[in-house]
Image: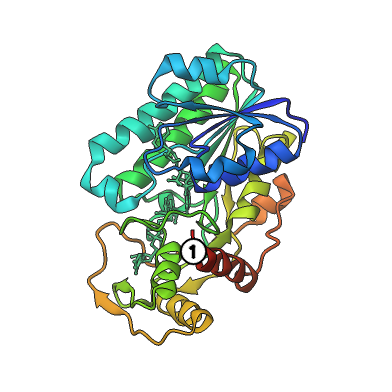
Amino acid sequence: MNCKKALITGGAGFIGSHLADSLTDAGCKVVILDNLTTGNLFNLRQIEEKITFYEGDIRDPEILDKAAKDCDVIFHEAAVVSVPQTVQNPVGSAMVNDIGTLRVLEAARRNSVKRVVLASSCAIYGDDPVLPKNENMEPKPMSPYAVQKLTGEFYARLYRNLYGLETVNLRYFNVYGPRQDPSSPYSGVISIFLTKAAAGQAPVIYGDGSQYRDFVFVQDVVRANLRAAVAERAVGKFFNVGTGGFIRIKDLWEMISGLAGVSAKPEYKPSRPGDIRESVANIDRARSLLGFNPEYSFEKGLKITHDWYRKKQTY
Ligand code: NAD
Ligand code: UD1
């Protein structure tokens, strides 16, 4: 990777911290700006000597200027990431996900950063019955979160057209892997199920459990980011980052309880408002323009993640 210095917003979080590991390994100087709402410094302990960390908010232009100084690229990961949380607090989450994103783009412009790679989401497709989801489909957001991510994409493309800032939007599908924080009921489902399994407890399944997701392993998402930071033909575009496969939520619990050797039966509750039913990616565009190919099968990624959560119980 031909990057001298990179800023990762939200770099103490799940995806951002894995990205920080890979960038430091590649010899890039890494700066992180994170307010530690859902992120954790523990995620950065292995690289703490190598990075510059700013504890602060992406809505604060002064700290953003310090963090973005002399960077060639910004990876924008900071966000309110939980769909239900944005349903409960549409205005507060928009302040972070919309205004915060605009602040990041402004800081990039002021500091002559060459490229910004932004974390978007497959949530923007909503419940369109056409599957798999491809980038030419009309977005049908069903939650404030999805509207906010879509707004971020529009701003990013505007900054390219108005100010010549190179921007790339990555529409992540459901990312999983070590370090995903399971502590809130709004956390990613795999982190919650693995934590329940490790404690021998039953999970809650919202809806009938037949809804499905395209789960993509975090290392694959990191590689998509690294490609997006350099690929010539990526600029001004948005890409699905998934696998093209899917797992139903009830089958997910079967797999996890099998791995963990627990027999607890899930408790079923009504579906969550704003929840989408079916989500699976067409990744042809990312394959052809980013050279992106997922390397982790679901079985392999789940095994690595399961092993990590099992050991985590002993910390
Ligand atoms: P995460 O919660 O682990 O990471 C988000 C980080 O942003 C945290 O470290 C948090 O402390 C930080 N943050 C939040 N608000 C901030 C603010 N105002 N200022 C500074 N820092 C702030 O979540 P993640 O799963 O790593 O998500 C990273 C990005 O990927 C997010 O933009 C999310 O919307 C997007 N995304 C995630 C998934 C997924 O399945 N995990 C899927 C699609 C998109
Ligand atoms: C997740 C991400 C969001 C991202 C989106 C892309 C998190 C917290 N959210 O949202 O940032 O943009 O993927 O698709 O990472 N479920 C249960 N029981 C539980 C928890 C969840 O049944 O205890 C169900 C949910 O109702 C849902 C599915 O599992 O149907 C996935 O939920 P979740 O992991 O929260 O992901 P998304 O809502 O898809």
Q: Nearer the viewer, residue 208 or 1?
A: 1
Q: How is the image coloured?
A: rainbow
Q: Nearer the viewer, residue 221 or 63?
A: 63
Residue at point 54%, 69% (across, down): 306
Q: Quadrant of residue 8?
A: top right
Residue at point 58%, 13% (across, down): 111
Which x, y percent locates residue 66?
Answer: 52, 15
Q: Is residue 46 left or right of residue 120?
A: right
Which x, y percent locates residue 121?
Answer: 47, 48
Disc 1 beta carbon < 8 A from ligand 1? no
Callout 1 environment at 10 Å: few (<14), some (14 to 19), or many (20+)? few
Q: Quadrant of residue 220?
A: bottom right
Displayed-image quarter of ligand 2: bottom left
217 shown above or below 168: below
Which x, y percent locates residue 305?
Answer: 56, 65
Q: Mark 1 belongs to which amino acid?
A: Thr
Which x, y percent locates residue 54?
Answer: 49, 25
Q: Nearer the viewer, residue 200 or 176?
A: 200
Camera sees residue 142: no
Residue at point 46%, 81% (across, down): 257
Q: Nearer the viewer, residue 48 or 223?
A: 48
11 shown above or below 33: below
Q: Is residue 42 left or right of residue 129?
A: right
Q: In the rendered image, which residue does mark 1 sit on?
A: 314
Residue at point 25%, 40% (across, down): 90
